[in-house]
Image (spheres, rainbow, N blue to C red):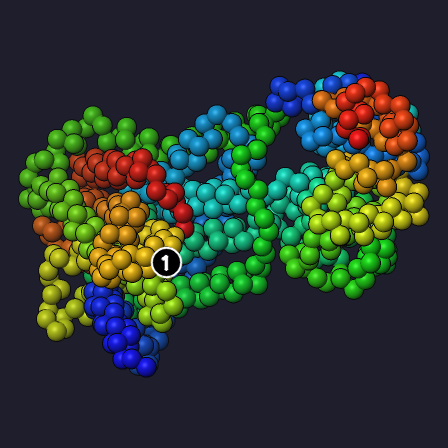
């Protein structure tokens, strides 16, 4: 279980996260929804250990991970623009995390991951020849392959066109459900969040304004801003 | 079909031919023809066979190769800390640090050699290697950091979230991504050090000679032109192989990816602050030592005033400065005219001539200056014997400078929308008026920078000049070498003083280029 307590992050003198509290139960998918600049991505980066925490705590199963370096946290993060390694082919991209974490049976797992995202046989391909949707799938496969304790997706469909978004949305939803992954999904799109997540956390100006299912939030908004944002 | 368009095309064709003729004749007669004569002389000599010199030849060739490889490796190692610092962080003085490491790179080889002598380093491999590192650190810092600082930080972060420790992020992601720029820097340094002349001639003493130095000794000191020609052939083979290997490698590893903008580099914090400070201060400090000792040792011995006294053997040393400035002015004009005309031909759309020009005009870059100078004394007795003419000095300098002139002006000319030219033509401008009213104003700033570069190149050129200069027509570099070749502290003092003068002239011109801010210094 992930627990974020009173988290404050300051970057270049600006307070980006101003006391965030959040719990994600095992196997639960929480969608973080909010306008751009509200601190959604920074929250994921803080949990991953990519930005420094000014105060507050991040706990996994009750133990603080704030002092644990990124590469030992076993939290997977899928980046907004995918961040695929251009010098490696598709298979080597997916194998990267497996190799780094000393996981056995790399080839079989890579093949399984490719199959999961519907890209069987794409292993030897180069990254710069892939379409946007294919890159998105490879990034998802790479993030999932080492079986992270927590999966974080930062605007997983942000860079794609509408038709593709719809199709991939269902696919991602199936993958998350099938594997009972504990996950955080950042998005600025209400429907996307509702489709993927069990609960939604609404973020504004570095704090979480309200948490609940979409019905709870629309039925009982905490304030006018929540009501108008979800409208 | 009306015949008028065809006539028009033919007329423009003739016009282009006239434009192309100037650079073609210049490069043809002063470069291709002499180099061909050297090749012919060398190859026919190899045919006759001469066992006695093969062992010496092998030794020189072997030394040239391994010192170049070692110089390249050492330079990359020495440049690594500063490259890391300027690529990974933004900090006060970052730009200044990059500018300061470039100073040694623009200094004439003779100045660098003299500076190491001033520190008491001579007649040793160590001195040669150190001078080569001193010279080329900027190549690594500048070529690699432009790529490194633009690698998307998300790639590093992705590697970390996938479980890679900072060291493995560096070895598995950063380093492989930097490979193309490392290969580019390494091959440039290899070429520079493989063809190193001034530094080796001054610091190598009698024991150590590269092919360049040996060509000079055989041709100028021992008058064995055939053997010198064989060496020149060996040299050309070595350079061609290196260039070929590099282009093959580039093709094989070509990876495209979107580069980040440099703006969002983080500030160093914690231990990184200390490491960045150490890298910057350590590198700049080490580079300052040879120049510092050159300047301090040249002062206070009366060497500067002695430059103005007449010497029975070498004449008034300061006269060489007058010669140098005159040659540099002529070379600058020559390189500007030839280079601009060539660039105009190269940037003309879709002509076969333009592709040919692009390749042929870059050839002097891959050929050593010594080979050019040697070619002059071998070949320029036909159709007239002009080998004793002092004009050959600025001509040789212009040859070396033309590729730089072309490289600085071609990108600007290419950036001109063809529509603009077409519009001018439709409005009734002749091809020449289109060039004068459209191309020339746009390219003039780049052309001025290219011309200033040519001036700097001419001031410091030593390899070719050492073949062609006669007593009385010498340049600052050849005068410095003559002074160094003579015994005694007085001569050495004058050599150091003259080296400081040359360094100051070079620095002043380079500063001017930097102020003009067109194109970066040290783009290769």
**Picture quarter with the N terminus of chain B:** bottom left
Looking at the rendered structure, the number of numbered marks drawn on it comes to 1
Rendered location of residue B266, percent (x, y) = 59, 30
Q: Which of the two residues, A55 or B122, is positioned nearer the viewer here?
A: A55
Q: Secondary structure at mark 1?
A: helix
Is residue B64 among what the camera can see? Answer: yes
Tell me the residue at 83%/34% (across/down): A31
Q: Is residue B405 left or right of residue A88?
A: left
Kindly identify which chain the residue marked by label 1 belongs to.
B
Q: Which of the two residues, B173 or B460, is positioned nearer the viewer here?
A: B173
Tell me the residue at 71%/48% (across/down): A160
Tell me the residue at 21%/50% (across/down): B332
In this view, B429 is above or below B281: below
Would you identify the image quadrant in which residue B120 lies? top left
Rendered location of residue B147, percent (x, y) = 53, 45
The residue indicated by pointer 1 is B418
């Amino acid at each position: 279980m992930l627990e974020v307590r009173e988290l404050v992050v300051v970057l270049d003198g600006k307070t980006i996260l101003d006391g965030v509290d959040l719990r994600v139960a095992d196997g639960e998918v929480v969608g973080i929804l909010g306008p751009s600049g509200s601190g959604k991505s920074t929250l994921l980066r803080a949990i991953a250990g990519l930005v420094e925490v000014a105060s507050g705590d991040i706990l996994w199963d009750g133990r603080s991970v704030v002092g644990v370096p990124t590469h030992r946290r076993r939290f997977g993060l899928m980046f907004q623009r995918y961040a695929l390694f251009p010098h490696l082919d598709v298979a080597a991209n997916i194998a990267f995390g497996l190799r780094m974490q000393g996981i056995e049976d790399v080839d079989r797992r890579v093949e399984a991951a490719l199959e999961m995202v519907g890209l069987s046989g794409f292993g030897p391909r180069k990254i710069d020849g892939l379409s946007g949707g294919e890159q998105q799938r490879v990034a998802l496969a790479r993030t999932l392959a080492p079986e992270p304790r927590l999966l974080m997706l930062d605007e997983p469909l942000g860079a794609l066109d509408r038709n593709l978004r719809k199709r991939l949305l269902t696919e991602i939803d199936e993958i998350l459900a099938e594997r009972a992954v504990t996950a955080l999904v950042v998005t600025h799109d209400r429907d996307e969040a509702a489709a993927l997540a069990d609960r939604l956390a609404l973020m504004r100006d570095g704090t979480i304004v309200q948490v609940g299912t979409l019905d709870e939030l629309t039925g009982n908004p905490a304030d006018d801003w929540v009501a108008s944002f979800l409208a | 079909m009306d015949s008028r368009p065809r006539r028009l095309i033919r007329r423009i064709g003739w016009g282009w031919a006239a434009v192309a003729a100037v650079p073609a004749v210049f490069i043809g007669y002063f470069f291709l023809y002499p180099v061909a004569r050297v090749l012919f002389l060398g190859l026919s000599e190899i045919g006759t066979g001469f066992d006695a010199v093969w062992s010496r030849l092998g030794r020189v060739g072997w030394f040239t190769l391994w010192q170049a490889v070692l110089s390249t490796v050492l330079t990359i190692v020495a440049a690594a800390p500063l490259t890391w610092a300027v690529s990974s962080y933004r900090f006060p003085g970052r730009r200044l640090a990059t500018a300061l490491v470039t100073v040694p790179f623009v200094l004439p080889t003779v100045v660098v050699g003299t500076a190491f002598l001033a520190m008491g380093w001579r007649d040793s491999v160590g001195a040669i290697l150190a001078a080569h590192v001193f010279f080329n650190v900027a190549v690594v810092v500048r070529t690699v950091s432009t790529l490194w600082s633009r690698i998307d930080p998300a790639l590093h972060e992705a590697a970390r979230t996938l479980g890679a420790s900072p060291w493995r992020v560096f070895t598995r992601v950063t380093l492989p991504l930097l490979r193309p720029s490392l290969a580019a820097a390494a091959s440039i340094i290899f070429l520079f050090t493989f063809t190193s002349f001034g530094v080796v001639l001054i610091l190598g003493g009698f024991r150590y000679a590269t092919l360049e130095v040996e060509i000079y000794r055989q041709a100028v000191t021992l008058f064995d032109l055939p053997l010198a020609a064989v060496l020149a052939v060996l040299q050309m083979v070595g350079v061609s192989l290196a260039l070929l290997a590099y282009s093959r490698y580039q093709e094989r590893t070509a990876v495209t990816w979107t580069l980040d903008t440099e703006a969002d580099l983080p500030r160093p914090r914690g231990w990184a602050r200390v490491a960045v400070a150490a890298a910057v201060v350590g590198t700049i400090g080490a580079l300052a030592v040879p120049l510092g000792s050159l300047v301090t040792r040249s002062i206070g011995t009366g060497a500067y005033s002695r430059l103005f006294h007449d010497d029975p053997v070498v004449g008034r040393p300061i006269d060489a400065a007058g010669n140098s400035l005159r040659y540099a002015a002529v070379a600058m004009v020559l390189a500007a005219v030839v280079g601009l005309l060539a660039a105009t031909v190269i940037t003309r759309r879709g002509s076969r001539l333009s592709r040919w020009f692009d390749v042929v005009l870059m050839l002097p870059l891959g050929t050593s200056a010594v080979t050019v100078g040697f070619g002059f004394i071998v070949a320029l007795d036909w159709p007239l014997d002009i080998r004793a003419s002092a004009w050959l000095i600025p001509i040789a300098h212009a040859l070396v400078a033309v590729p730089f002139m072309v490289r600085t002006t071609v990108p600007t000319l290419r950036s001109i929308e063809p529509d603009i030219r077409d519009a001018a033509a439709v409005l009734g401008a002749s091809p020449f008026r289109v060039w004068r009213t459209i191309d020339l104003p746009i390219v003039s700033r780049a052309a001025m920078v290219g011309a200033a570069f040519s001036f700097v190149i001419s001031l410091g050129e030593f390899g070719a000049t050492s073949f062609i200069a006669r007593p009385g027509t010498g340049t600052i570099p050849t005068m410095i070498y003559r002074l160094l070749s003579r015994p005694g502290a007085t001569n050495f003092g004058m050599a150091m003083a003259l080296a400081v003068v040359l360094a100051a002239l070079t620095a002043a011109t380079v500063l001017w280029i930097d102020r003009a801010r067109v194109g970066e210094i040290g783009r290769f």
